[in-house]
Amino acid sequence: MKSGYVAVIGKSNAGKSTLINVLVGEKVSIVSPKPQTTRDRILGVLTKEEYQIVFVDTPGLYKAHNNLSEMMMRTADTSAKGVDVILYVLDGHERVSEEDARLIAKYKKLDVPMLVAFTKTDIMPSEKIPERLLALSQMGVDTDMYPISARKGRGISALEKALVSLLPEGEKCFEEDIVSDRSERFMISEIMREKILLKFDKEIPHGVAVVVHTFRLQENGVYEVSLDIVCEKPNHKSILIGKQGRAIKEVSSFARQDMEKFLGKKVFLTTYIKVKEDWRNRPSLMREFGYDESLE
């Protein structure tokens, strides 16, 4: 059979995590419209009878502004090394730029087989697709490009087939029933962070971390979950709480519903909000909140 690792690389908000979730058929990465939603390297595993693809979801390529984002950019670069294929995900809805061509050329130099997924074709005029693919070619991009829509499932099978053709022959990397290398506890924290990003849009910047303290299946079949939502400023805490606690109640309710869907069991969720100023530039707090460079 064919088996190997595919690093999924691209600029922030290009649709990498959505694409991986669709290919794997399970939620393995959280999704929001905000750049840099993915902070860690996360594996999503697709296993079929004749092949296994291990997708490496990476943080979006983005200009670093603090220690956390610098670590994320190193994680993205490190993840592109030692894999069997690089899948560069490009937001087709946006105009292609010289930066896109530069980034593709940068990873092409690693001498790893590469494909380009041209995403979000469902929200752009169809006549623009060949025009933008041509623009990329004129910028020197000579990699095979696949227009897709993860939301609509368009072009996914062709992309999957192309990826498989580039994989080496080998044994499975993971057992058939595994879809991710991340624990349920990790996914619970990510689901909470996803709902915060979706709920508060631009009101709360990326300085939010979620730390799970209790994750326990009780005898009655209900998961007990308690967690801290850590923000960087007192006014962010006020926004998260909302008037008479309405905001945190609403986001917690949305998160609990998604947690129950993910776990397949009822969840009793307790949330606390704490302020740790400038934690994204404090290595000791980054490690405490789970952002450890050893993950690279």
Image (cartoon, rainbow, N blue to C red):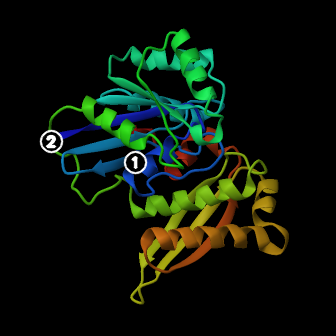
Amino acid type of disc 1? Leu
- Quadrant placement of the C terminus: top left
Rendered image: mark on residue 43: none
Instruction: Choose the circle earlier in sequence order: 2 or 1.
Output: 2
Q: Is residue 251 visible?
A: yes
Q: Is residue 251 left or right of residue 112?
A: right
- The foreground one among 269 and 123 is 123
Residue 193: x %, y % from top left: 60, 57
**Count of numbered circles on the image:** 2
Residue that numbered label 1 is attached to: 23
- Residue at the extreme right: 243
Q: Residues within 10 Å of mark 1 (few under 14, many from 20)?
A: many
- Quadrant placement of the N terminus: top left
- The foreground one among 199 and 69 is 199
Q: Residue at x 76, y 67 (%)?
A: 247
Residue 293: x %, y % from top left: 45, 38
Residue 257: x %, y % from top left: 57, 73
Q: Residues within 10 Å of mark 2 (few under 14, many from 20)?
A: few
Q: Residue at x 40, y 48 (%)?
A: 23
In three-dimensional space, the C-alpha distance between marks 2 and 1, rounded to whole angstroms, equals 18 Å
Q: Is residue 275 visible?
A: no
Amino acid type of disc 2? Met
Task: Tell me the quarter of the picture where residue 110 sits.
Answer: top left
Q: Is residue 226 above or below residue 47?
A: below
Q: Secondary structure at mark 2?
A: loop
Residue that numbered label 2 is attached to: 1
Task: Tell me the quarter of the picture where residue 13 sits.
Answer: top right
Q: Is residue 144 left or right of residue 33?
A: left
Q: Residue at x 32, y 49 (%)?
A: 45
